[in-house]
Image (tube, coloured by chain):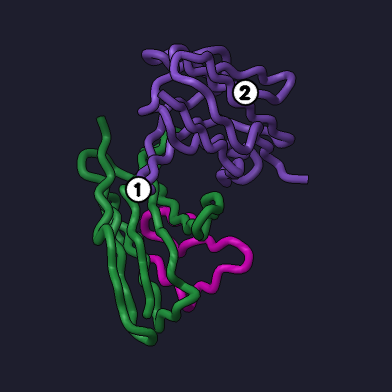
Chain colours: A green, B purple
Amino acid sequence: GAVVSQHPSRVICKSGTSVKIECRSLDFQATTMFWYRQFPKQSLMLMATSNEGSKATYEQGVEKDKFLINHASLTLSTLTVTSAHPEDSSFYICSAAQGAEVKLFFGSGTQLSVL
Amino acid sequence: KNEVEQSPQNLTAQEGEFITINCSYSVGISALHWLQQHPGGGIVSLFMLSSGKKKHGRLIATINIQEKHSSLHITASHPRDSAVYICAVRKTSNYQLIWGAGTKLIIKP
């Protein structure tokens, strides 16, 4: 089946640094990728939707200058948390949709801890 | 009111019991997903439904489009089924994914 690879699985960084998370579709072309955030004991929250070659659409309350999303190719999307702060510590997960299909494939997630 | 409501929020059952988790939604959808989130955070897509019923092993998912309701059933439950089960719908209006709050399932041996 289709596989989405997400790296890194865990990252610990100092406050003020930037962190990049990669999401790759390994055997299909992901025309749409979704980025989510999950705080402990809470449900997943959609942060943004990105279509290949165009700017990401951010959900209300998500700062686009802080969470930079790049979807430059059909197999790679990146989320960069800029100037990370402890309140950005969370579980980030990506999912990818293939063409007109509504089936989603999920990355394994990235646990970000900002000290 | 949330556009996607899941119930129950928590469910504890004995091994072997028949499990039902419900999902109701109030928007027009193109698809409904059932997902399983493991304690480590990883998410597995269980089913994608747009109508009818799907079965995979001990898991059964049904959807009633008219009633805007879906159920996930687990037959002969096992401790390894312990996880959070999440319902998500894809809105037809803007293709946005709306998530339910999840159901935390614990199966005791």
Mark 2, Cα crowd under 10 Å, few <14 / some 14-19 / many 20+, is many
Q: Does the magenta stretch include residue A23?
A: no
Q: Quadrant of residue B10?
A: top right
Q: Earlier in the sequence, mark 2 or mark 1?
A: 1
Residue A62 relative to residue A9: left or right: right
Q: Nearer the viewer, residue B60 or B88?
A: B60
The disc label shown at residue B40, or none = 1
Rendered location of residue A90, percent (x, y) = 44, 64
Q: Write the residue at 73% across / 19% down.
A: B66
Q: Is mark 2 on a helix, strand or loop?
A: strand
Q: Quadrant of residue A69?
A: bottom left
Q: Which of B99 and A33 is in front in this view?
A: B99
Q: Name the residue under label 2.
A: B70
Which residue range is magenta in the image?
Answer: A49-69
Up-down: is A18 above or below B14? below
Rendered location of residue A95, percent (x, y) = 39, 47
Q: Does the magenta stretch include residue A57?
A: yes
Please state which amino acid type lies under the numbered disc 2.
Answer: Ser
Q: Is mark 1 on a helix, strand or loop?
A: loop
Q: Mark 2 lies on which chain?
A: B
Name the image quarter holding the C terminus of chain A. Answer: bottom left
Q: Write the residue at 36% across / 67% down.
A: A112
Please state which amino acid type lies under the numbered disc 1.
Answer: Gly
Rendered location of residue B42, percent (x, y) = 35, 45
